[in-house]
Amino acid sequence: MHRIDQRFVELRRAGRKALCVYLCVGDPSLEASGFLALEAIDAGADMLELGVPFSDPTADGPTLARAAQRAIAAGATLERVLDVASRVRARSEVPLVLFTYYNPVLVAGEARVARLARAAGVDALLVVDLPPEEAAPLRGACAAEGLGVVPLVSPTSHAARIEAIRRASTPLDGAPRAFVYSISMTGVTGASPSDLAAAARDAEGMRRAFDRPVLVGFGIDSGASAKLAAGEATGGADGVVVGTALARHIEQAASGDEQRRAVRTFVSELRRALD
């Protein structure tokens, strides 16, 4: 079984919700991102989204945009993010999702990115601005390497659109089932908290529609909001994704040691709230 699917099986058996942590790789440096990823894992993250910094991050709010700018200034590129992924993989079997916009993938080449991602130990790609109807070539390239492509659903996705996304994102042979990323609000990351309780309820319908785990992201900035977004123990979402709040902790820390402590403390808070 694929690593990412196995993790959801383990979580379901344990009656636990998944905690997926996003890191903008390269912020504050490529070397530090590797250490911070391992801190997040040790503190209880079930999987990681490793973000490729992009100069025009249309889905990201000011906090993640600043993180991307710092990462680019520190020399982060798609290939170097994958180098960090390979170092994390050498230390952990936690599922890794490469989070990126499509332009870096287009420039590098879909087949090459899939090949490099597999070699680095990545389990799936999440391409924020790639419409599912345009994703077939990338999905094919990823499936050939045993990787998945995570679909996204937003609050503005009506029933017909959800069905279209489902049809276009059905896992191909060789690819993991992975999960569906449910965006809790309209707008960018780090915006005002959304109705997370409603997002958790909506996740139940999406899980039935897609027959796959559903993670809720956007607007989660504390243990309390993580618990709200995850929903009831026997329903709601299968887990949550947290990114902006963690990037804010990293940004506000005064030293590398403080950054590591901040990541450990905040991820531990999220873990306790979900458990």
Image (cartoon, rainbow, N blue to C red):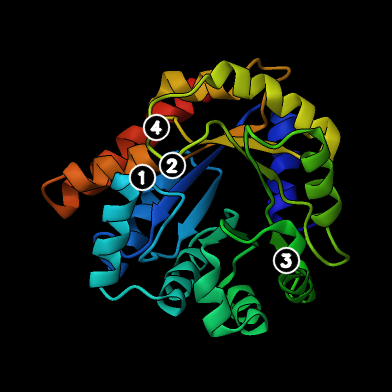
Q: Residues within 10 Å of mark 3 (few under 14, many from 20)?
A: few
**Foreground of the two, 237 or 101:** 101
Q: Residue at x 46, y 79 (%)?
A: 79
C-beta proximity under 8 Å, tags 1 and 2:
yes
Q: Earlier in the sequence, mark 1 or mark 3?
A: 1
Q: Position of residue 266 (x, y in %)?
A: 34, 33
Under circle 3, the secondary element is helix
Question: Of discs 4 and 3, which sits in the foreground?
Answer: 3
| Image side of residue 28 versus residue 179, left or right | left
The residue under label 2 is 188
The type of residue carrying mark 4 is Ser
Mark 4 / mark 1, whichever is N-terminal: 1
* Mark 1 and mark 3 residues within 8 Å of each other at the beta carbon: no
Q: CA distance from mark 1 to mark 3?
A: 25 Å
Q: Mark 3 = which residue?
A: 134
Q: Quadrant of residue 222?
A: top left
Which badge, 4 or 3, is on the more N-terminal residue?
A: 3
Dividing the image into 4 quarters, which one contains the N terminus? bottom right
